[in-house]
Amino acid sequence: MVILALSLISALLFALVGLVVWSGLRILRRRPSAVGIARRTLWAYLIFLPAAVFILAPLLFSAFLSTASTRPQDLALQETPADLGCPSESVEFRSADGVRLQGWLLPGDEEKPAMIWTHGLFRSRREVLERSCRLNAL
């Protein structure tokens, strides 16, 4: 999130500096010639096109990926262990880097080994819920 904010701030500052330079050139030359306009337009493209490619495009791409909007069907998954008749307890803790982790603890037989189920990137814990409950009942 910090990288996203810094990228946005740098893009805004770059645009602001470009606006100030462009305004200054407009004030200094009240009636620019066609060649002057073409030259400034070319410089604007040479300056702002790389900025758009190297600042705005990665910023927009990372914002798209971080919202996980690529998997809207996961929003329809609403099952809990209680819906499947599996006793459970909601747990939550923070990782070493401060990320909040949430899950379900399915208590099992103490004589049997413990299993930890995880999901993949942009996935949901509800996708492995049915298998977890079946294996917990064994």
Image (spheres, rainbow, N blue to C red):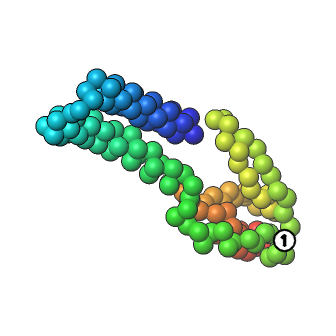
Q: Is residue 13 visible to us here? A: yes
4 or 19: nearer the viewer: 19
Above/below status of 61 relative to 20? below
Read off the residue under disc 1: 82
77 over 99 or under it: above or below: below
In the image, taking residue 29 as reference, residue 131 lies left or right, namely right
Q: Residues within 10 Å of mark 1 (few under 14, many from 20)?
A: few
User: Eyeballing the image, is 100 above or below 31?
Assistant: below
Q: Nearer the viewer, residue 123 or 13?
A: 13
- What residue do we see at 63% from left, 69% from top? 74
The residue under label 1 is which amino acid type? Ala
The single residue placed furthest to the front in the displayed view is 31
What residue lies at 80% left-to-right and 52% top-to-bottom? 91
x and y percentages locating residue 135 in the rendered image:
72, 71
Viewer-proximal residue among 136 and 128 = 128
Residue sitting at x 75%, y 72%: 79
In the picture, the quarter occupied by the C terminus is bottom right
Question: Residue 131 appears in which quarter of the rendering?
Answer: bottom right
Q: Position of residue 90 (x, y in %)?
A: 82, 56
Instruction: Examine the rendering and report whether any part of residue 54 can be seen.
Output: no
User: Quadrant of residue 103 in the image?
Assistant: bottom right
Which part of the image, by quadrant, shows the N terminus?
top right
Residue 6 in percent (x, y) is at 51, 33
Give coordinates of residue 125: x percent, y percent: 67, 63
Nearest the viewer among 68 and 123 is 68
Looking at the rendered structure, the secondary structure element under dot 1 is helix
**Direction from residue 48 to residue 118 in the image, left or right:** right
Q: In the drawing, does residue 131 fall left or right of residue 31?
A: right
